[in-house]
Image: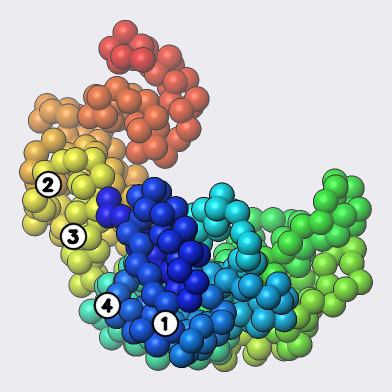
Amino acid sequence: MSNKHVLIVDDEEGIRLVLVDLFTELGWIADQSSNGTKALDMALSKDYDLVIVDLSLPGIGGLEILRNIKESKPDVPVVMITGYASMKSALQALKLGAYDYLTKPFKLDYVQRIAEHAVERKRLIYENKYLQEELRLRYGFDNIVGLTPSAQQAYLLAAQVADSNASVLILGETGTGKEYIARAIHYQSQRAGGPFIKVSCAALPESLLESELFGHEKGAFTGAITRRIGRFEMADGGTLFLDEIGDTTLSTQIKLLRVLQEKQFERVGGSETLTVDVRIIAATNKDLQKAIAAKEFREDLYYRLNVIIINLPPLRERPEDIPRFVEHFVEKYAKETGKAIDGISSDAMAALQAYAWPGNIRELENCIERAVILCNGRTILRRHILLGGDSVPQVSSSTPRLRPLRDVERDHIRYVLNECGNNQTRAASILGIDRKTLRNKIREYGLGTEIAD
């Protein structure tokens, strides 16, 4: 790990030497200067972790040095020194971006604490920028699979509107990737540095959803023992993703409409009006036009949401995209499981492309995850692909074609457990049941003597 690097700028030699000795003892590399002009050249030409500057200097003053550093290297923390005990100068420095200030005479242990906190803050800023860039790359539109014209049109429209503040309504069946598109729009927008907050509108009853969206004050209802910040406040400066908005009640829709129109709301049980800057991306698998006709969805809210409409086609309408999805998921889960899987057989791929995929991309991903777990070779074969009501592929060539369902289920569970190395948690996940149900099935079919617990 490289040493941290500090620049100390003060026209008093005694101050400089004391600080240089302190940071040297702490393992830092300490540069020093008594001249503002020279110090500014050093600060802009080298990579410092911290700059400590006296406000009063010959040549360029401390505030001018601070201003120039913040313009060129905004992430470098700058701590000011003042000998005047002047709050006015200190506050001016803080407004210009100084991390903190020291008033002469100062204690060295206090200087050390400030330096450690400043460097930690710089590290967090760097990590945040790195993570933001990673998210921007992960949710880049170049990563989205789509060869069919309908898919390409949806992704192109998403890319075109990303940098605007327009509300977006994403339509598509369950599992078509609506949340992924919403995140891609956010992380390719000017709001990428702000939060991306998701709310599943179908997961909560109306009373809880209102509190989730807008927050509540202490005592607003039974159980409200403290104030709670809602998702709109959390998303301030960023994007709020309202998933399954077609499942909201008319009462909730009225409140959402007000926020979209006025950017204002009150917490449940509160009287303070809050203002937020939030971009709304909504999604639903329902036909909102039919919901409007049935008086189940407000038409005015619909037109507020659908400034931009993106329609995601179901997977069954884009079979030519399946090989690219499969390649991506095989690579992902082979890496997770540590398996050296090269690819998938042609008959397995043909089966995948012929299947209707009612669960769309999410179902395909789950299917490939199971196939990777079941595959013990370098290639995923047709027998590793379990589709819909598929039972376990041929246990033996002599197995009768017509068998009781109980026998098929028993053999299927035995096969999956064996392929999973008797890991019941993983087997239950593949079978789509919970572990308790699996254990009951093991007892029911007398598999306890065959299968390790």
How many marks overall?
4
Measure how far apart labels 4 and 3 are at the Cα level: 16 Å
- Give whichever of 327, 74 is nearer the camera: 74
Element type at mark 4: helix
- Give whichever of 444, 41 is nearer the camera: 41
Q: Earlier in the sequence, mark 1 or mark 4?
A: 1
- Tell me: 239 left or right of 149: right
On the question of residue 177 being in view, the answer is no
The percent coordinates of residue 413 (x first, y second) are 32, 27
Q: Earlier in the sequence, mark 1 or mark 3?
A: 1
Q: Amino acid at mark 3?
A: Glu
**Which color mode does the image show?**
rainbow
Q: Residues within 10 Å of mark 3 (few under 14, many from 20)?
A: some
Residue indicated by mark 3:
327
The percent coordinates of residue 344 (x first, y second) are 12, 53
The residue under the point 57% across, 71% down is 81
Q: Nearer the viewer, mark 1 or mark 4?
A: 1
Q: Using the rendered view, name the quadrant where residue 177 is placed.
A: bottom left
Element type at mark 3: helix
Relative to 46, residue 57 above or below = below
Q: Residues within 10 Å of mark 1 (few under 14, many from 20)?
A: some
Q: Which mark is residue 142?
A: 4
Q: Earlier in the sequence, mark 2 or mark 1?
A: 1
Measure how far apart labels 2 and 3 are at the Cα level: 11 Å
Q: Residues within 10 Å of mark 4 (few under 14, many from 20)?
A: few
Measure how far apart labels 2 and 4 are at the Cα level: 25 Å
Residue indicated by mark 1:
35
The percent coordinates of residue 144 (x first, y second) are 30, 73
**Cβ atoms under marks 2 and 3 closer than 8 Å:** no
Q: Which mark is residue 341?
A: 2
Q: Earlier in the sequence, mark 2 or mark 3?
A: 3
The residue under the point 27% across, 77% down is 142
